[in-house]
Amino acid sequence: MPVTPLDAIVAMARPEGGWGYYQNQDIQLEPTCVALMALAGHAATHAELIARGRAALETQSDGKGLYRLLRGRPEAFWPTALAVAARAALGDSPADLDVPVRRLIDKRSMTIIGDPEVDKIMDIDATRVGWPWADGTFAWAEPTAWAVLALRMNGKGDHPRVIEGVKLLLDRCFEDGGINYGNRRVLGAITEPIPGPTALFLLALQGQDDARVAAARGYLMRAVAPMTDLEHLGWAKLALAAHDHDPAVRDFLPRLDAQIRTAYDTQTAEGRPVSVLRHALVELALHSGVRHPLKLTGSNATPVPATGETVPPAKPQAPPKPGFIEGIKTKFRNFMIRGLGAMRQPPEFGAVHIGKAPSYDDDLLAVLKAQYEHYRPHLPITGKRVVLKPNLVEYRSAQVINTDPRFVDAVIQLFKAEGAAEIIVAEGPGHWRNVEFLVEASGLGPVLRKHGVRFVDLNHDDPVKVPNMGRTTGLDFLYLTRTVLSADVFVSLPKMKTHHWAGATLSLKNLFGTMPGICYGWPKNELHWRGIPNSIIDIALTQTPHLAIVDGIIGMEGDGPLAGQARHSGVIVMGMDLVAVDATCCRLMKLPAERLPTLYLGNVMKLGRLAEADIPQIGETIAAMAQDYAWPPGMEKMLMESAK
């Protein structure tokens, strides 16, 4: 008998209540909230499961109205709006929700006022106040949309915060339809809307008579029409079902139901793992015509007024001073980390191998095997658990943005041949939350299924709090992922590209994708504004990859990492010293490696070697394979001063 979404939700519940994103994961707030919304329509038959889920949800409350994953980053309060919406769906009244609603209203984003450089970089109104993913950061579309929706569900549609939130969302959407996490244009390059945030935008702006809302409906229907991705389809159905006053939407909804049923039946029949979130979205989507917990009704559906009181932004706050005992512990940790830093040495074997690989259709495995011969004595693989981290940022069919799946295929074959006990491919992109869609759209999914290799979404993996071994960001701790920390061998598999913020994105910048979005948000902006080089080096010093293998067969030049042009280089670069690997790649692109802040800082912090004379080169020579890559716009401004 075929599995139903409701059966799966029931079966995947944790014994003590609540749900993780995946089977056997500890409780996570988002899947718990969406699963409870899905069960709200089955209260009579699943009362006990709902009660356990609600109790589990309350274990993640701070007792003062905010919901935050207790084992996660305490600043990341964004699940509060989902918890308010879930409790409202289960029948809690506005009076029951008064405390979390007031706390949600009190939370606000920082803004940027009067900075002409910001106007040159992006075309949004940075003075608008919305909701951030985490305290002390800037507003983004998804947490703002959830907060607006949750507050409207509780009769706060005319509150100044909701009015301002709607203005922010309208400011950030595309005139021709849709929204992403917040930026339409960056450094002159147009970004693209994304189905997930667009669906939440439409749920938040129910009843708003605005051309941009109508355009978003049109975009969402066009975007999901050819899709089989359950997450995109589920959110789209919930959003469009809340806008069924539109005749075009009404005509589209039956077709969307059929798509969802077919995609769900196909994926479950194939035995492909389906997350709790996706089971719950399918359950909600297919019954949204009968019960729709996120559809506004009555006075809550009244359009949000166009004007309201001025909303002040969050005030930057100094971190709280630790208590006496904690202060002693902090001083001790700092002392120990400084001591370890003084003793730190780059990897003992610092040679970098440049292999020639003219095409993805060549025998890449043979190239990789020849390269790895030099590293096996220093990094044996037999019996090890290997985690591979490709660069999987965004999917655009006309551009070479991601680590090529044929390259990943060959790397998997290499480590299988070397006797790895387990191979996992893992990624947590900052641009798209729906990484499962990227895995399939990019062509990586079939490769993983061919090899029986598991994929782990690091954005939603279990977070682990660890001391920051770099401290250049000012953060005492980082929240890393259990999958990466538990690897015996951790391998960075980047695409060789230029980058408009960092100069180049290679094996070190690739580590941004190891930071869990549930702790840092999307696009993990706090790590950007704390300084990209600082964040990269802190992450690399705290969870240093054992090996880097760079896909330089076809790279990207110009306005990378998304909008640049393809550039054929025909190389694979391998090494255990990531600073040395990235410096070598920069020299292959004829970028000034010594002047790139990330590499300079990595060398100063003794993460790796930077000077060309200090890096033994094996395989092909830099001189033989180097090409003039076009620089990203404004790169001169980010470079360090030349040595005198």
Image (tube, rainbow, N blue to C red):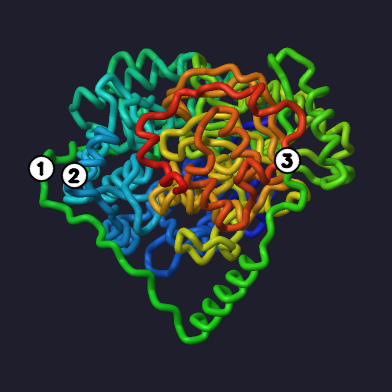
Q: Dot 3 corresponds to which residue?
A: 616
Give 499 or 521, whichever is nearer the viewer.
499
Image quadrant holding the N terminus, namely top right
Residue 485 in the image: state x and y as whole percent: 68, 54
The x, y position of residue 335, in whole percent, is 57, 76
Is 204 placed left or right of 555 in the picture?
Answer: left
Q: Quadrant of residue 271?
A: top right
* Residue position marked by numbered label 2 in the rendering: 163
Mark 2 vs mark 3: give the one in front.
3
User: Which residue is found at the position 63% from the left and 32% from the top?
Assistant: 4
Q: Amino acid at mark 3?
A: Pro
Horizontal relation, residue 6 to residue 100: left or right: right
Q: Secondary structure at mark 3?
A: loop
Which residue has dot 1 on it? 307
2 and 1 marks in contact (CB < 8 Å) = yes
**Which residue shows up at 11% across the image and 47% down it?**
308
Q: Nearer the viewer, mark 1 or mark 3?
A: 3
